[in-house]
Amino acid sequence: MAKARLEELYKETIVPQLKEKFKLKNVMEVPKLEKIVVNFGVKEAVADSKSLDLVLRVLNLITGQKPVKTQAKNSIAGFKLREGMPIGVKVTLRGQKMYEFLDRLINMALPKVRDFQGVSRKLDRRGNYNLGIKDWVIFPEVHHDLTDKAYGMNITFATSTSNDELGFELLKAFNMPFSKLVKKEV
């Protein structure tokens, strides 16, 4: 089985580049992308279970991996939500599928976002990055005629480092389109 393009880029280019830039002594200190978690919250699933099945099928198309349903942890009477009810779907990508998804996200999906100015530069102070996407139609696998409702998703990039600077540089080396820093004039 052939390696994913970004996996080869990581091993051949990014590892030596980060090792030199941060003066790391051991190759095991170089941060790596451990997993990508794609999560959909489907509030309509409380009233209509078919919407959850649609999101399940679409997430399977986008990631190439079977998603799992997530369930409510607490009951909330105001939302007519009971503990254990399915209210979302998620998939955890690792290895080759993770790198292939990252490649499609960076090179095909994000450029399709209208008025795209780049993604936020803020990490979670543990070296991980969260990206919210408002519309799933930016992925080429999703057809416009599937539904008239647009669903948003959260994508979490978990890295092996707990340092935000190392995590940021790792994602930047993968060509993540971060927004430009704007200097304010005093």
Image (cartoon, rainbow, N blue to C red):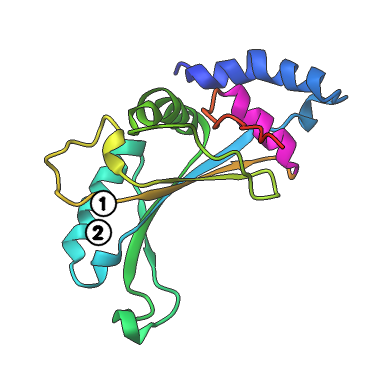
Residue 74 against residue 185 in the figure, above or below: below
Q: CA distance from mark 1 to mark 2?
A: 5 Å
Query: For mark 1, what is the residue?
Result: 55
- Residue 166, given in percent of the width and then of the height, sits at 73, 34
Residue lying at the far bottom in this picture: please name it. Answer: 77
Residue contact between numbered discs 1 and 2, judged by CB atoms under 8 Å: yes
Query: For mark 2, what is the residue?
Result: 52
Residue extent of the magenta highlight: 163-174
Q: Residue at x 66, y 19 (%)?
A: 14
Q: Residue at x 34, y 50 (%)?
A: 152
Residue 118 against residue 129 in the figure, above or below: above
41, 66: nearer the viewer:
41
Q: Residue at x 81, y 17 (%)?
A: 20
**Residue type at numbered disc 2:** Leu
Other residues around mark 1 within 10 Å, as few (<14) / some (14–19) / many (≥20): many
169, 178: nearer the viewer:
178
Other residues around mark 2 within 10 Å, as few (<14) / some (14–19) / many (≥20): many
**Residue type at numbered disc 1:** Val
Residue 161 against residue 2 in the figure, above or below: below
Quadrant housing the N terminus: top left
